[in-house]
Image (spheres, coloured by chain):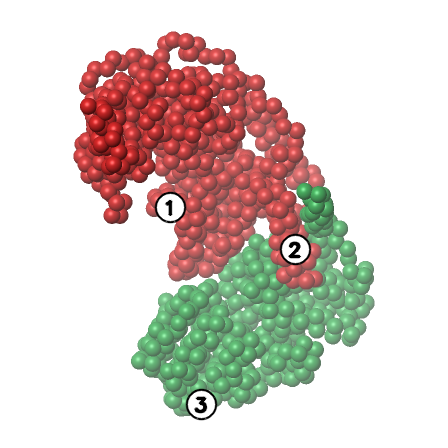
Amino acid sequence: MQKSPTRRSVTAGLALGALAAPGLRIAPAWAQAKSVKMAMIAPLSGPWARQGQLLRQGAEMAIDEINQKGGIEKLGGAKFELVVADAGDSTEKAKNAAQRLLSDQPDLIGGFGSWLSSFTLAVTEVTERAQMPWLTLSYSDAITNRGFKFIFQTSPTADWQAAETLPTALKLAEAATGKRPKTIGIIQDNTASPVSFGKQLREGGGLDKVGLKPVVDQIFTPPLSDATPLVDKVRSAKPDFLLLLTSAMPDCKLVLEKLEEFKLAKGKIPLVGNGAPFGSPELLKTIGPELLEGMLFSVANWPLKGQEEFIERFRKRTGEPFATQDALCGYGHTWILKEALERAGAADKLKVAEAIRTMNLTTGPAALSFPGPIKFDEKGRRQEVPMVFAQWQKGVPVTVYPEDRAVAKPFWPSV
Amino acid sequence: MRTRAEASRQRWAILGFALAILVLSFVVLKSAYYQLVLTQVLLWAVLSLGWNLLSGYSGYFSFGHAGFWGLGAYTVALGMLYFDLTPWVSIPFAALVGAVAGAIIGYPTFRLRGHYFALAMLAYPLATLYVFQWLGYQELALPMKRDAPLLYMQFEDQRLYVVLALGLLVAALLISLKVENSRFGMALLAIKQNEPAAEAAGINTWRWKMLALMLSGAIAAIAGGLYGVVLLVVTPETVFGMLVSAQALILALFGGVGSLWGPVIGAMLLVPLAEGLNAELGDVLPGIQGVVYGIAIIMIILWAPEGVYWRVLDRLPRRKPAAAEAPPRPTATVVPLPHERRASTGEPLLVLRDIGISFGGLRALDGIDLAIPEGGLYGIIGPNGAGKTTLFNVINGFLAPDRGAISFAGEPITGLRPNQVCRRGIGRTFQVVRAFPRMTVLENVIVGAFVGAPDDATARQMALAALDRVGLSAQSGAIAGGLTTRELRLMELARALVPHPRLMLLDETLAGLAHDDLNGILTVIRQLRADGITVLIIEHTMGAMVQLVDHFTVLDHGRLIASGRPDDVVRDPSVIEAYLGKKWVDRVAVPAK
């Protein structure tokens, strides 16, 4: 046991250090007294770390731009500063991160996060009590259904997206082929967002309203081990198009590969999805451009016409093949807070919140980062937001709808 | 079992701990963040205590306490969403849900032991997770009640959550203490150390295990309910996930499994450590916090494999075994035997009719007919593999016979569980002594006394009397793990004797003893006969038995081959053949004529 004292002291030191550390938090040297702080809480570790990283990249890019252009003008050119906290992989960690950030940083003027709806729900319980203006890209309706006054949801809500996705997809199909699809196949997993999407279609009358008959309707529990039974039903029922609502990449890959194996891929059965993961660079890397070609997906935000210069800089800076919803929102949310600060004229969270409530931005980097104007209703939902559709074309997911912000023309893979 | 004084010391410790937490919360910690973390520390400690109540004490490891935690959280969330039920009502209700879930889970799962039990428990939360997904409860947000925050447990002041969580923890500690100090806790400890012995000593292991799981489930669920209120968002992954079950286990193992304070120590150290690492490293090197946390756990477990609590306790100067353990000699020693002497009436006390049992193709017992009259010493002998121990196992209920019937004192006992057989007055010892090695000699014997004793104090008196009867009073405070073979045999005898059985089954009690030790035990056994207890004893060596017993029965290959007075039986040709082989039959048998 002669080694034990060393081991013990190291352990004790480690434990003590970790326990004591929160109290000894040292402010970074570049944080000058004059700077104005905003927060980001996003998953930076765990299964959603990649999305958090993209949000952060977007936000940091905006911060650099703002500071290079002279900081916050109305506050005498004060530097804008981003404070980051890791929401980790559970709601408990996300909520702790929020509580910690608000305790450690009493002078925050606002923030955004936390990507996953359940994280956002937990985080905003804290920010709401602190009267901290909080922006989020999370889709869940529950976020803005609670009567909160300080939450601003820049994405159209899940229910709204579910209601709008099919009519828009049908419009695109009709415009491209002259024929209106009559039947639909649905393959979805049973995680939170596909479930609420599917519920709107089936119980909320989403299918009836557009006169679509579901000839395949399959719900599976991830992870999928074999897509054959699902795709086999698609083969025999031959729907006019297939709505694919998967949240995990491997499941999506299995379905697409099985479609290929059954000679249903590459447009034989047009594919429509919902959500940013359908346009991620990882999907391209795993599945390859051929199987993805022609796939349409609705999403809250995607690179739009007018952002070319920003996208180019983003690609250079990060090495990503293209910008996605997450990076765009990180960038856009930071700019919204900057605009609000200019309008508020003070580094005061209540005034910033009031400025966001009353703003109606149609120009500038903030407005450019989102489809539709930056204008919120009393629930904190953005008004006059069009549904955005992107489509995989030659290995890049390009925005094809709404027309005025589209960067390419949609095509409907013909049967 | 702790003494009263010690239990009272523990209650003061709990009170002191609660006051310390209150001071920490109301005086030391200023920010809402630390209050939140403290609340979580307390809640995780409650979960871990709940886990400890089952797994720490009884040794039935559960990898599935997330099941109870999650049910608690969902009870509160669904109650509020669909019935507008305040957590003040739904959290206590969650305890009921947890207890019922414990009963439903325990019923099939306690058929399994060891790793199989642990793995089966793992399945429940994982399966429930999918059920809740299927039901469409992927993401439940508790509605904010601005008009009546107090009614719905939605406090502006985080410290009130600390108070509530502390209340739960104190309750869980007091329940654990109560369990530790009662026959409930003793029964669980006995089950952990040797379940068959506990069962044979008359403990209804099934009942205590079920009670432990239900209580454990209730505690975990009530903590899960408050956790739901604190987080305000409930998703299947966060409440039913593997990490929750792992947390319950890790905190207890780390702090000291099977101890009152272990889970609390584990939570107080590990939860802030993990959170501190998240806070400090999460934004700098995301993910590294998990690595550091893991290393810290590994290092502390290397230093304290049984947990911090036990390690620290080992380091502290050991208190001498309390003087109370060497009690005044009870008056019971000298005369009035609790059993009135029964004369050998000749009425058979134990009757076996046509008993048969097979293991696969082996007929271990085949058509055994046996009638043991009350009073006297009966020997069962036979070579190795003759079926002697199997016969005992059939009599005391470890094995159910394939055919045949057993009756004791005129009543059928075929198919009863060992503890029921014990309650009817049949005690037994084992070939290999089945002690509870981490308990004291006295505690070992008290376990046997619960059958007949109306209360714990009587049990203690009865145990002391039994120890005195076998001459082991001086060792009553010693830990059973350190006894000699002779002392262990005597202790086991005392444990079997304490509920005053009418029949004692002694399984090779004389095996492996030195000559002097042998005489000591023989004296005790003869004394039993003198006290009117019928004794059935197994041996495979004949020497000692011939002097000891009144009647011999010989088994070979599962069959009864001879029965009668010892002198006659040892000359029986079939007995000689069974022991020595055919060629000896002639040589030995001839001079006998």
Residue ID at (62%, 25%): B319
Label 3: which secondary element: helix
Give the CA separation, mark 3 to mark 2.
Answer: 56 Å
Please tell me which residue lies in front, B501 or B557: B557
Q: In this view, does A98 lie above or below B454?
A: below
| Circle 3 residues within 10 Å: few <14, some 14–19, many ≥20 | some
Q: For residue B112, which numbered disc appears in the image? A: 1
Task: Return the chain for callout 3.
Answer: A
In this rendering, the label closer to the viewer, 1 or 3? 1
Where residue B276 sits in the image (x, y, percent)? Answer: 67, 51
Q: Residue B292 carries which label?
A: 2
Q: Give the spatial CA distance, label 1 vs label 2.
A: 36 Å
Name which residue type carries label 1: Leu
Asked if labels 1 and 2 share a chain, the reply is yes
Chain B visual colour:
red
Residue neighbourhood size for the residue with mark 1, other residues' Cα within 10 Å, grouped as few (<14), some (14–19), many (≥20): some
Instruction: Nearest to the eye among marks 1 and 2: give it.
Output: 1
Query: Of the numbered discs in the image, which one, if any, rests on residue A176?
Result: 3
Which residue type does callout 2 highlight? Val
- B321 left or right of B27 in image: left
Whether pointer 3 and pointer 2 mark residues with C-beta atoms closer than 8 Å, the reply is no
